[in-house]
Image (spheres, coloured by chain):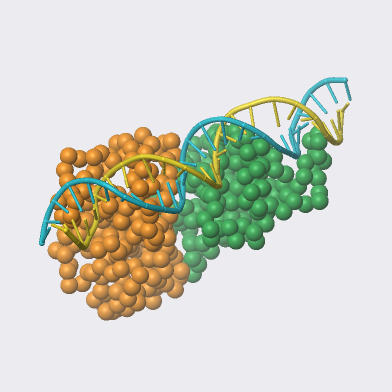
Chain colours: A green, B orange, C cyan, D yellow
Amino acid sequence: MGNLRVTVDIVIFAVRERTLQVLLVKRGVPPFQGQHAIPGGFIHEDESLEDAALRELYEEAGVRNVFLEQLYSFSDPKRDPRGRVITVAYFALIGSDERTLIAGADAAEAGWFPVNNLPPLAFDHQHILEYALERLRNKVEYTTVSFELLPEKFTLSELQAVYETILGRPLDKRNFRRKIALLGILRPLREWQRTGRKPAQLFRFSAHRFEKLKDKGILFPF
Amino acid sequence: MGNLRVTVDIVIFAVRERTLQVLLVKRGVPPFQGQHAIPGGFIHEDESLEDAALRELYEEAGVRNVFLEQLYSFSDPKRDPRGRVITVAYFALIGSDERTLIAGADAAEAGWFPVNNLPPLAFDHQHILEYALERLRNKVEYTTVSFELLPEKFTLSELQAVYETILGRPLDKRNFRRKIALLGILRPLREWQRTGRKPAQLFRFSAHRFEKLKDKGILFPF
DNA sequence: CCAAAAGTGTTAGGAGTACACCCATGG
DNA sequence: CCATGGGTGTACTCCTAACACTTTTGG
């Protein structure tokens, strides 16, 4: 097995300005120098893949404690011109709270791009990104991943906007609110967001209540 | 990255005698010599992970053209006492047609074990197997994987038995048949299975019709 | 007072679930 | 003729989807 190496690449999603966006870095070295790529890098000697992903997430995006899940391993022998490199792709979701941190990490090189309007990508990263997007769209329908894309306190309209952004279609406001309420996983706060016109009530996701439901196999039927 | 190696391990499921079973091999060399393990091996220089899995599937189980899907990559630095070995796990489903072939492959060393009654396994294979089982149970509910566990022609009772075996609970016969019929993905044949008492009509899975439904996001609500 | 987003109930149709008996065959 | 598995319909409940107006605030 001549010279096999393993990298970890991370597709980092966020919802900004009601669009789903991905964090990309600009490559400073060949191959694909100057092109955009998903952040990632080689794994270290004594770390698991997940540890490597967490490390990269901090080094390249400046965030910790965000949602992270293994996506898929890509292994076409020709996917990297430098030689045999397998990559294990992860995907991460970051909420609006953390988004500001990223500017501090490596602002000149990292940037957000809407998933509908991406630049050409290095390696097979276009393919990886499409795979991540499909996974995200699927997971929205049967998990609470969408909460990971919001700040700690959020309004129901913001929550609905995240769903609509990821699913790519409008949802009925009354039906949406009824279903969310039925799940009983939101804690209403005694705070109101005074930004728009009429103030909107703020909510917090109650992971505790959600845990109770998970075992019963609750779906999010939108 | 001292001496990183990558293996592929394959959890091979089949339904035999109305139980869900897994194919295990007995290790002939250390470490874990004499213990049971999921079939697998190191990847070759110029093959993708999927190609490696297909190769192992043929070498160790004697089957081709079966359902195969990448499961997860396991990477605990201590998972293999020989050194740093990452494994990419796959899971495969084989139908009753192919089951006989396996005897020819390496009968002395390979054997079927019911998932509810497994011997101690080498490495972290217990963990991998549990992960595969969970994935299978999930996929049954929203894909047609169960058809992969049947011969080309089958009766509705056989199909129902596969669902019941994987889900681990009995299903109502009339509701089951109505839902399957509603999906319109079975082609009834003009053949009857004359084994039991009253002959049972044979059916064939119509992948063609299923493809049309997939885009519409059809679920299997059992 | 006007624009913009927040908030709120009802109804009709479809899907899911529970349930029991007759039929065809081989021995 | 009997044991075994094959095959069929209905009624009730619950979930889903469609749909429109009033309220509150800032400018």
Left or right of D2, for residue B90: right
Left or right of A191, for residue B4: left
Q: Can residue A182 be seen in this view?
A: yes
Residue C22 image point, x, y percent: 26, 47
Residue B64 image point, x, y percent: 21, 53
Q: Residue at x 50, y 53 (%)?
A: A90
Residue A192 image point, x, y percent: 81, 45
Residue A149 image point, x, y percent: 63, 48
Q: Which of A13 and A26 is in front in this view?
A: A13
Q: In this view, does A215 lie above or below B127?
A: above
Q: Is residue A15 visible?
A: no
Q: Nearer the viewer, residue B210 or B198?
A: B198
Q: Which residue is drawn at 65% across and 54% down?
A: A185
Q: Nearer the viewer, residue B43 or A166?
A: A166
Looking at the rendered structure, the number of numbered marks drawn on it comes to 0
Q: Which residue is drawn at 37% across and 39% down?
A: B182
Res A194 quadrant in image: top right
Q: In this view, does B118 lie above or below A140?
A: below
Q: Is residue C5 above or below residue B200?
A: above
Assign the N terminus of chain B to one quadrant of the image.
bottom left
Q: Which residue is drawn at 41% across and 46% down?
A: B220
Res B33 quadrant in image: bottom left
